[in-house]
Image: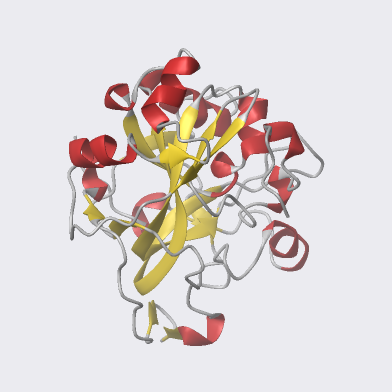
Amino acid sequence: MSLPTTPRLWPYEPLNSPLPLPQQPVIFSEDELFWIEAEAIEAESMSVDELRNTVSDWKSASGDSIDSILSTLGAPSMQERRLILLIGELANPSRLYDIGAGPMPIINVRIDDVCRTWNDTLDARMVQPGVHHITLARTQGWWESTHLGFATLPQIRQLIEYLGDGSRIKWKPAKLAEGSLHVLHDTTMEAPTIDDIQWDGTVELVERERPAFDGPELPFEEVFTPIHTLAGCYNHRGRFARCIHYLQRSFHDNIYRRGSARVWSDVISVVKK
């Protein structure tokens, strides 16, 4: 399938998030999607400034760099942007169009020891009975792919407020005090299966060898991450309903029961201000 050229040609509705989502870097804009060729990065780790400088030179098929495309769009450069983890529908071009987020470069990344899991709320603005948003929870030994956005502070505020339907208390742009984050070059990497997870009735952990990292580690504590601070995440009989294992519809139809939630601070720790 050829890559869509506009958000409205993106074939997957946000209701189907978190899969399938962009498998290569892209610059989102409301009028056009600019697909970027990822370059392998040999460094073991990078600062935020080093990442911005490196990624700003990545190019589209036409040879235009990310910074030059942003300039053409009249959008702030990479140096004026912060990092935000885009989990689930926030990396869906169709949803970003609905939000009116404005131009934003997005790259593929890998998270370890934290997982994407469903939130115990329903957002009925777009469809009935509603969409479940995605949050994060710890799981020792876990790994999976997700997306990292380069956004301005107003864009970050807009994305977080969208998740809360205008509320500034339901969701917050936290900075995680656990887990690790790496640039991901090979986006075919597969996450652990349900059978790879061991559970002693209290704690879940992955007892399978981790795949090697193929990109530099990034300072997770400097990345904004959307965290639901009221209902936490869904409590699936003491376990997590990970998005990799249960997509939106199967989760809602086969697992979800209203009112079963974990407190957010019990499942993830954040950097204290």
Please tell me which residue lies in front, 176 or 203: 176
Q: Position of residue 215 (x, y in %)?
A: 29, 60
Q: Who's the residue at 34% across and 21% down the image? A: 77
Residue 223, by quadrant, is: top left
Give the answer, above or below, for where 197 lies relative to 273: below
Horizontally, is 129 left or right of 4 in the view? right
Q: How is the image coloured?
A: secondary structure
Q: Who's the residue at 45% across and 31% down the image? A: 64
Horizontally, is 268 left or right of 230 in the view? left
Q: Position of residue 203 (x, y in %)?
A: 38, 77
Res. 64 in view: yes
Q: Position of residue 261 (x, y in %)?
A: 54, 56
Q: Residue furthest top?
A: 74
Q: Who's the residue at 56% across and 28% down the image? A: 162
Res. 151 in view: no
Q: Residue furthest front?
A: 63
Q: Position of residue 167 (x, y in %)?
A: 52, 25
Give the answer, above or below, for where 195 lies relative to 26: below
Horizontally, is 258 left or right of 162 in the view? right
Q: Quadrant of the N terminus?
A: bottom right
Please tell me which residue lies in front, 44 or 179: 44
Please tell me which residue lies in front, 260 or 251: 251
How many numbered circles are shown?
0
Please tell me which residue lies in front, 138 or 182: 182
Q: Quadrant of the C terminus?
A: top left
